[in-house]
Structures are given as structure tokens and as C-alpha cells.
Amino acid sequence: MTEQAVETVTADDVAARAGVSRWTVARAFKKDGVISEKARTKVMAAAAELGYVPDLLAASLASDRSNLVALLVDDFDNPHKLVMLERLTRILRAAGYGTLLVNMLGEKDAPEALLTASQRRVDAAVVIGTQFDDGIRRTALGARRVKQLIVFARAGTAPGTISIACDDVAAMTEIARYLMAKGFRRPLFLAGPNTESTRLMRKDTFLKVWEEEARGARPVVIHVPDYSMPLGCEAVVAHLSALPAEGRPDVIVCENDVLALGAIDALRHRLGLSVPADVAVTGFDDVPLAASPAYDLTTYRQPVTEMARALVRVLNDGGSTSADVFLTGRFMERGSA
Amino acid sequence: MTEQAVETVTADDVAARAGVSRWTVARAFKKDGVISEKARTKVMAAAAELGYVPDLLAASLASDRSNLVALLVDDFDNPHKLVMLERLTRILRAAGYGTLLVNMLGEKDAPEALLTASQRRVDAAVVIGTQFDDGIRRTALGARRVKQLIVFARAGTAPGTISIACDDVAAMTEIARYLMAKGFRRPLFLAGPNTESTRLMRKDTFLKVWEEEARGARPVVIHVPDYSMPLGCEAVVAHLSALPAEGRPDVIVCENDVLALGAIDALRHRLGLSVPADVAVTGFDDVPLAASPAYDLTTYRQPVTEMARALVRVLNDGGSTSADVFLTGRFMERGSA
DNA sequence: CGCATAAATGCACGCGCGTGCAAAAATGTG
DNA sequence: CACATTTTTGCACGCGCGTGCATTTATGCG
């Protein structure tokens, strides 16, 4: 770079320039600071001339509030994560929060990921699409205060955490009833890993509603060790190719869109079946690709924007919130079911 | 939360416990700090007992080095962004850097996005997939030092910035020659927006190589105002449906995968054509979806991991680097061309 | 105009740690 | 064992701003 490093201009410089004290400058920059209109305009003018911008780092140190939240993500394979990141970063920024993106490499990396965040004094650590297990939580609370632990897009169970998520029960009930009404009789449920930290209510709800209301046999469930298109694809191939045509499911209900897209690939390209004529498919999330003509996936849209707004509300409440938040999304009827 | 907020444990506490001074504690935590082995183990033991973790915020304030880099992203529609984010966050974290994810809402939001980052004293601001125009750059350098401006995955031109990207010229040359060898004669080039801040060398290279080596007519180029599947899809529909069958291109060369996926959708689902039998398609980036059987897209993989490593190197050099970095990726031959 | 009240402003102290140098302890040498 | 070196340790000062309270200035009222 050719230009000189600009001297850092501090609140003191602005104060001198405006003929007030440094604290008056600080007040001018606080949205509801008590300060006379005259002083505020003087300060702002001086600040503009000098190109002053408050230093959030120093502010965080002094005030014990960083306006920073850590977003802990452990699965970058799911395009829905990108949707959530877009929404979260946009809405959090508008609300005055910065976002620290932390790549959590897996279960066992969680404590260290959390430490990384806590070292920067984040106001909250938000895990996206996973849960805290209890060990993680203790690490977080122990090492240095991470004031809040929030589980986003998943129902958390650990005490001391609050979760903000889509109302899976309502959603899955709607999907199940839609499929019943459409005349489907032999659903196959394609689920992700069956571990504590990834548990969703989707599978249980679907099974429950289906058994109670369709009076059919208990639907078959297959689990896949990870949410990924190839795994979903292979699982469907393996399951269906071992089945006689008449034992084939008429619809595959998937725990999320990624699995559903994999299932569609399997049906069309590996098994030579047609979707939805031979087998229908439903997903969950409404990733952008679900709307493409290639997949045209019937799915359920998570209310991501509302969830992000709820997160802001929780953050602004500063720890006084304790109840989980569940929001209803929207059923997206498309061509695949 | 039921448990008490743990008292913040500072270096002083550790020092007292270990019977040394605070500065010795600091040295123990610096990987190449001069300190006796005895003192270091004493300090580490005390730190472990107390659960001490250095406060990066205070460290940043004192040292003028935050080990934080801002990642400015302005297009969350492209799944390749998720690939880059995964790689960058993982590799930067391993190298000791935190990552601040900033959602840049558009051209005009860039200065403010940059300010957001600079307020936290980031060591570098990295724009991903866009360029800095000169105005932005001045904002960045002016308001508060953002020590480095780095353009990732795009060739930057602004002075004072360095860019780390895929070698588009080599890549596109390889694609062009492959297509020539395969016998394609009438390529259509599907490009993104034709503005300064998004300029890539891909289009120019393709046209140049094609004209020089295929001795064919200059390929037709169509521009789309934004990199998105629907836009790519519509553009192809509009262009091809106005053409007689014999004037139809035999291959559509796309500036990136998103456009290519849109083009495939257009050909198959809107125009009833077969890919690659009627029209072949190539992309660029190698997004995960490109490998799915539904698209099976021939494309070029950007060397994202190497690019991220190069970024770390640049960061560690602390501003002494000034040359751009171009890395070659890998041609991915698949079924679409 | 005098006094009570409200509004606006100023300031001491601290947040937790890094830098650069000086003092102290350990080590080596003849 | 005295002295020169080297290694190790301690410390004053500052990074830029917030908090809480004391002080000053403006405003209202009879």
C-alpha cells in the first residue's frame, strides 16, 4: 500500500475538536444517551471531519458486552446452512451484532470451538443444527463466561441453553396429513443419524401421526449416518433394490431436503423410477434447489427469518429469556409429492 | 442458568497461584516466549487448575493485532460460497485466526460492511467473490486501519489490495481445448454480470483461445445480471427458443456452476433437449452438486484449500506480501460435456 | 428574582494484557 | 572464586472506552 497508515483517531481527538469532554463524545454515539442536541451535532460534525469510528474492541473490554455472537456450524455440506448464515448475519448485523463464524469439526471439537469463541467474549454462542451435549455446556460455562448458549434450528434439551427452532411437530403433522389426503399408503421414512445430539422431532411425529390417523402399518424407517446427498442416495438404492416392486413404498418422507434430493437422484438415476409417478418424495427445509425444475421438491420451509428475529430478541433480553421458541413455517407443495 | 457466573480468572490469578509474575504467565502462553521450562510447567499447571484462558480481546487491544479476519460475502446464493467458508474457517482457525462473517448487502453496502469489520480491528478484510472498487478501498483505509485488504477467489485490480484466486486463464484454456478436442464447434458462452467489480478472466480467455485455436466464428456471449440458477435458466430458454434448431449451440460454456446448473435445467426441463446429446454444458467451481447424478457436470475445481493456505501465508507475512497469488485447480471431466 | 428541580457534562478508575527495557538469577570461564 | 555472559524475570505504561457519581448549567415556578 502506498498511503500512510492513518493515525488512529480516538474519542479524545473528537472531544478536543468539538470542545467537549471525551464522555460527551461517547454519549453522542450512544443512541439513547442523555445529551443536548447542540452538543450532539457538534460532536458528530467533528467526528465526521476526523473520520472517527468508535472502537468496538475497547468498548467490549470496558463494558463487558461485545455485541458479538459466535455461530458454531458443524456441517457445511447442507446448503440450508448457507440460507441460515445469510439470514443470521444480515439480521444480526442490522441489530448491531457482529458474527463470529466457527467451524466445529465434529462432536469432539465442540469444546475447543466454544473456547475459541469465548476467548473473544462473545455475548452468545449459537450452535446451528446441532445440540450441546452436557460436557460441551460445562466447558462453555466454566472456562470463561459465554453469557448465553443458544441452539438454533434444533430443539435442545440441555439445561441452561435455550433453543429457537421450527415447530417440527406441527410441520410434520401437516406433511403426514397431506400425504394421507393424497392417498399415499406406504411411506418410507428416511432419517439422519439417530444420536442424541441430532435428535429431531420429525421422525417421531411422523410415525405417531401416521399410525394414529392412517391406521396403517408402522412405516419403515431407515437411518443414514450423516445428512448428505450421496448417503441418502445410496441408502435408498440399497433399500429399494432389495424389495419386490409390489413392496415398494409409494412415498419417501425425508428428514431434510438434502436426503430428499439424494433420494430423488437414487430413484431417477439409479433405479430408473419416476418421481412422483412411481415414488413420491418430500423433504424438509426448503433449500433453494428444492424449487428448481430438476427436483421440484415438495417440502416444508423453515421460518428462518422469524427464527433470526427471535434470536435477536433473546439476545437483547440479555439472559432473562429462558423459554424455548418454536415457530411454524410453511408447507411448500410442489411436484415431487 | 442455575450455576453462578464463574469469576473471570485473569493472568494475575494464575501468576499468584504459580508464584510468578503476570508477565511470566503471558510468556508461558506465547509459543516461542523465552521462559524456563520449570516456570512454564508451573504456570500451565496453575492455569489448568484455575481454568484460565487468555482473553483475546484484551490482547488485541494491547497488541494491535486481533488475529481476526473479516470475511465479506455478498452473494449467499452460490453454494460454492459454503465450500469456501468451510475451508476458510477451518484453515484460518487452525492457524489461530478467528473469522468475522459479514453479510455485504450489495455494492453500496460495501463501505459500511467494511466499517463494521474495522471497528473490531480485524487484521485483514477478505472479500469473497467480489472486488473492492476504489471507493470502498478508500473507506477502509481511511476510517480505521484495516491492515490488509484481500480479494479471495477473484482477481482484484485495486491498488493496495492483493488477490488470491484460481488461475482462470489456465483453467479456461484447458476447458476450451478439451471442448475443441471433443469436436464441439458452436459454443455459447453464458456469463454473469459484466461489471467492473465482478470481472473474471474466464470469458475473455475462452473467447481468445477459441478464436485463435479453433479458427471458428467468435462465440456468442450472453450476460445474466446475477449469478443464479433461475436467471441462468431463463437466459438459456430465451436465447435458444429464438433460434432455429440448426443454429443451436452444441455446447454452453458457463462462467460458473450455478449458471451451468440453470442452463441444464433449461435445456432439459424447459426446452426438452438432452444433455449432453443435444447440447453439452460446462461449469466452473465444482460445487458439490456438480457431482450428483442429476447433473453430472463437467467443470473445473477451484483449489480452495490451497487458496486458503495461501491466505494464511499472506496474513502471517503481515503486509510484506504484495504480489497476487494465482493457483491452478483441476479439470473435472464428467458426463455433461 | 430566588429557589427547587431537571438536564447536561466532567472525571477517576478499571477492563486484561503486550511492549520494551532494566534488574536479577543462572551459567560459563580462567 | 571473581567476573563476564547469557538466560530469565519483573515492571511502568498504555491500548480506547464504559460505569457511576459528582458537579455544573439550564429550566420551571411562585
Image (spheres, coloured by chain):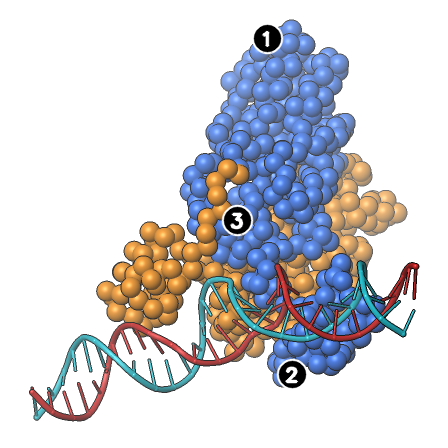
Chain colours: A blue, B orange, C cyan, D red
Q: Please, what secondary structure does the residue beneath circle 3 have?
A: loop
Q: Please, what secondary structure does the residue beneath circle 2 have?
A: loop
**Which picture quadrant has residue A211?**
top right
Given residues B250 and B114, the one toward you in this image is B114
- Pointer 3 indicates a residue of which chain? A
Left or right: B72 with respect to B194? left
Q: Name the residue carrying label 1.
A: A217
Q: Residue at x 59, y 25 (%)?
A: A201
- The CA distance from mark 2 to mark 3 is 40 Å
With respect to residue B30, does A91 lie above or below? above
- Pointer 2 indicates a residue of which chain? A
Could you tell me if residue B76 is visible in this image? no
Q: Amino acid at mark 1?
A: Ala
- Pointer 1 indicates a residue of which chain? A
Q: Name the residue carrying label 2.
A: A3
In the picture, the quarter occupied by the N terminus of chain A is bottom right
Given residues B11 and A152, the one toward you in this image is B11
- The CA distance from mark 3 to mark 1 is 47 Å
| Picture disc at residue A146 | 3
Indicate which label's residue lies in the foreground, 3 or 1: 3
